[in-house]
Amino acid sequence: MSDALSPLAPKHYPQMPQVEGVRLAAVEAGIKYKGRKDLMVMVFDEGTEVAGVFTRSKCPSAPVEFCRNNIAGGRARILVVNSGNANAFTGRRGREATALTAQAAARSVGSHEDEVFLASTGVIGEPLEADRFSGLLDDLVKQAEPAGWDDAARAIMTTDTYPKLVTATARLGDAEIVINGIAKGAGMIAPDMATMLSFVATDAPIAAPVLQQLLTKATGKTFNAITVDSDTSTSDTLMLFATGKAAMRGAPRIEDVRDARLAPFRKALAGLLKELALQVVRDGEGARKQVEVNVTGATSARSAKRVALSIANSPLVKTAIAGEDANWGRIVMAVGKAGEPADRDRIAIWFGGIRVAHEGERDPDYSEEETSAYMKRDEIVIHVDLGMGRGKATVWTCDLTKEYVAINGDYRS
Amino acid sequence: MSDALSPLAPKHYPQMPQVEGVRLAAVEAGIKYKGRKDLMVMVFDEGTEVAGVFTRSKCPSAPVEFCRNNIAGGRARILVVNSGNANAFTGRRGREATALTAQAAARSVGSHEDEVFLASTGVIGEPLEADRFSGLLDDLVKQAEPAGWDDAARAIMTTDTYPKLVTATARLGDAEIVINGIAKGAGMIAPDMATMLSFVATDAPIAAPVLQQLLTKATGKTFNAITVDSDTSTSDTLMLFATGKAAMRGAPRIEDVRDARLAPFRKALAGLLKELALQVVRDGEGARKQVEVNVTGATSARSAKRVALSIANSPLVKTAIAGEDANWGRIVMAVGKAGEPADRDRIAIWFGGIRVAHEGERDPDYSEEETSAYMKRDEIVIHVDLGMGRGKATVWTCDLTKEYVAINGDYRS
């Protein structure tokens, strides 16, 4: 949790409504930070179903391995998240810590351990002393209440400068359902699974396999389309919990992803995930500008996304944006290094609405003054048309500033 | 050319001997910089053979395309290099500029245009006004003399803080031959072809196809094993010129790469390229530390190199090193994100001789104090053993500092 608020922080935070069947609580467990809450629980009523997507790192954290084992069961009663220690690369002791936490968590809600989900975020490679907080879980579960979203979002922060909370509603049959989501991000943010941690809950009655398909699909254009620094975390976790309580208000139970009644929910979920993902980018370590990279005219959508990520991950592009310099030459460089089909002499590049280059050279109408004025904005849109085909993709990132280096050269000490 | 000398700069520069058959000159052409030389020629006697490797960027500069066309001919009479403008992404006008320069250069040495080689380094996307310097070539060629290496190395600098010069000798048959090399680097440095520009000349009589094989092979473990910022330039060029003049001193002409007499030359060339490559890393933009990354125990050499590059390119690893923090957790992260075969619980990690982690967790004998003392050095060696197989690779990089961001946020203005 950094002292200085990101200049891209939201002007105000949403009032989070209740999600029926979900209760939350957070506490100061003293895992690493002092004077702030660092342990939170999300408690679910019986019958809650769950889906999740996780980091593709070959060295995942112990909690990620734990959750992967449980997610296939599709049932959740409690989520336990701590900040300050990622419980990653902690070997046998890491597994012991997840086992101990899972036992205590299951006991506190009277469930099986396969209905427990865990996440940890913070420093990698330090043993997590789970016995320091496993004794707190009973009390936390008792204290948990439906209005605890804000506290929970704050408890999972690390170098985030603001909590990330989004809420949405959608029609499901004749009922209105609620979706609430929280996230934390800041550094070590890249596909695949961009955010380190995000948890979304709804009262919609949707079966776990459907939740999983919705979540996987929506991730590609949201959390897997953002990058802060190209570094993929060992701990990336996104989970979607559905309590089903809206059934009592008449919402139909959905068991087939092709069910036409799902459309509004699908759209609301995608919008909520995108907003959470953008909040993560806007709170990227040291970020001063949000950058949207649109690539069109690629030979395929996959190729477009690779080119877009090459641009969004380029240190030279990101530092130029930090310097408010419309250095489109570096964008050409990033297109070239992506290795995807491209023809230099067909490329066109825009900053905002200003075309700076086309047909392989500087636009004859290029105005340094006009472009420089645009670069002073805090939301920059880059559009590259490759002129090869119809493939397109959008990714989001932030600029690379001296503050990023400062935060990350001084993180552990 | 930056004001502040890199703290990793050489303590002294070598006295460059003559390479018989090579003459050099440099001049202040005023392309972009003021008060310094920015245009150089290397003039070769008749009979000089040449090989080259170039950027794999899909958007190469006009000079790279020009050189690629000529390299197959294997003959060189003149090399013309300017700094301040890369003549990249300059479209039709870029091709016109290379054509104009090539005509003037060919005229000045009385050769065909297919024996001319060109390189440009500097800002991308600005038209290069070749007519501003093509008129200077006649005089430059006349002034060129065998002792001009230092001037030439300085004329090709951009954000480099020091000129890069290396010389070596080797036995070829009964004769001693000379190899001289210069390079410029600084930013936009990554495989494939790490350095932006490097030119090597020898008096050894070696046929162009043999030169090409030697150069391509040696590049993999030298220039293609370094990375400053993962950004691949549009202009990366490495050329090797052989005048053959040592034949007059009894050196045998080599026409087969398997010729046993080549061994000392091969070794000397590899050593020289490695030293030039390391000088580029040590002068990486904002660099304060040289970092060697050794990966062993991978399933193949190719896999080892990918893991090593994932570590060497990770902003989080590089900022931690800048902060003198032995944050091996971030190394685990970088291993994990590489996507190569790895088993978290078999990984061991050393900083210098200090093992900080093994079998998937912190080394029981880990001493924060000892490791912190090591991290204060200006040359850091990271060794990761994956415990999977016998594949190994070494790459070199530098740390990521606030100065990198400052240099690159303020480059064009």
Image: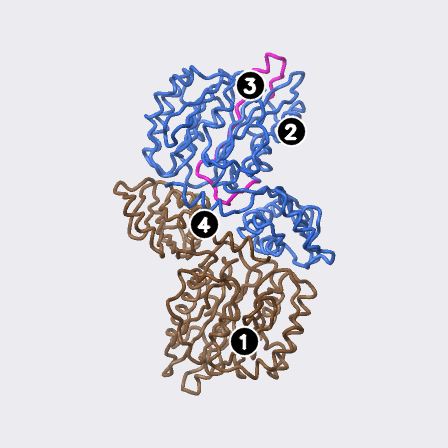
Chain colours: A blue, B brown
For badge 3, the amino acid type reads Val
Is A116 left, or right, of A355 in this rendering? left
Chain identifier of the residue bearing label 2 in the image: A
The residue to which callout 2 is attached is: A267
Chain identifier of the residue bearing label 3 in the image: A
Same chain letter for marks 4 and 3: no
Same chain letter for marks 1 and 2: no
- Residue lying farthest right? A365
Q: Which mark is residue A19?
A: 3
Mark yes or no: residue B74 visible: no
Which residue is painted at 62% across and 12% down in the image?
Answer: A249
Local SS, label 3: loop
Q: Which mark is residue B26?
A: 1
Mark yes or no: residue A215 visible: yes
x, y (%) of residue B2? 50, 62
Chain identifier of the residue bearing label 1 in the image: B
Is B202 left, or right, of A251 in this rendering? left
The Cα–Cα distance between marks 2 and 3, rounded to whole angstroms, is 18 Å
The Cα–Cα distance between marks 4 and 1, rounded to whole angstroms, is 39 Å
Q: Quadrant of the C terminus of chain A?
A: top left
Q: Which mark is residue B310?
A: 4
Marks 2/4 in contact by CB < 8 Å: the verdict is no
Marks 2/3 in contact by CB < 8 Å: the verdict is no
Same chain letter for marks 2 and 3: yes
**B170 inside magenta stretch:** no
Marks 4/1 in contact by CB < 8 Å: the verdict is no
Which residue is painted at 61% across and 19% down in the image?
Answer: A177
For badge 1, the amino acid type reads Ala
In front of the other: label 4 or label 1?
1
Q: Earlier in the sequence, mark 2 or mark 3?
A: 3
Q: Earlier in the sequence, mark 4 or mark 1?
A: 1
